[in-house]
Image: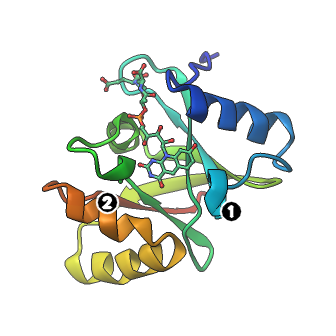
Amino acid sequence: MAKYIPSPRDWVREQVELYEGSGGTKGTTLRDTGLPVIIVTNTGNKTGGIRKTPLMRVKDGANYVLVGSQGGAPTNPVWVYNLRANPAVEIRDHTVVQPMRVREVQDEAERARLWEIAVAAFPPYAEYQGKTTRKIPLFVAEPAR
Ligand code: F42
């Protein structure tokens, strides 16, 4: 069985522990913003280990939009490469845990529509895109069954 490898970032690891440890009843928002967060369980593309990545909750119907912003950093977060290599994820949204499948958004019109939804859910994404020359990757997560 694959091993859980916690995030090396203290605040991220602690949020995952609180969120998962409470069964999705605590630690479900981003610090002082009060905005909701989901936990995306993904597979390390090199280690094969279990990675748990908190992201902002951006919903489009039954789907989630995953935004690889990493605060507008110059490089993509590593989980983006994990998702490209292995699209099977599990998403925890508060108390509900669902197996899902992700696909990276390539179509420009689809991207524009989803970007608008993402920025409405979490306005700082717009500022993050302005901070970096890379195009922030977007994924759509759809229920796997
Ligand atoms: N990040 C976002 O990009 N978007 C968000 O909307 C977002 C919201 C959010 C809300 C709450 C919160 O607590 C954190 C939030 N974050 C958000 C931060 C997010 O959780 C990630 O920490 C961040 O995006 C960075 O992702 P990362 O995958 O680059 O994480 C780094 C710190 C990390 O874990 N690195 C590991 C390490 O050991 O250095 C490697 C992890 C990994 O997956 N390794 C792979 C493997 O095989 O295991 C191989 C690595 C490779 O080289 O390919």
* Left or right for 142, reference 110: right
For residue 67, say whether it is visible: yes
Say whether residue 125 is left or right of residue 90: left
On screen, 22 above or below 56?
A: above
Residue 51 in the image: x percent, y percent? 54, 30
Q: Which residue is mark 1?
A: 34
Spatial distance from mark 1 to mark 2, Cα to Cα? 19 Å
For residue 31, above or below residue 106: above
Name the residue at 42% across, 16% down: 47
Location of residue 32 (image quadrant):
bottom right
At x 85%, y 43%, the residue is: 23
Left or right side of 129 for 54: right
Residue 73: which disc? none
Q: Position of residue 29 (x, y in %)?
A: 68, 55
Q: Residues within 10 Å of mark 1 (few under 14, many from 20)?
A: few
- Residue type beneath disc 2: Tyr
**Image quadrant in which you'd find residue 79:** top left
- Residue 58: x and y in percent read 54, 68
Mark 1 / mark 2, whichever is N-terminal: 1
Disc number for residue 128: 2
- Residue at 59 percent of width and 63 percent of height: 57
Coloring scheme used? rainbow
Judged from the image, the secondary structure of the residue bearing numbered disc 2 is helix
Q: Quadrant of ligand 1?
A: top left
Q: Residue 121: x, y in percent?
A: 53, 74
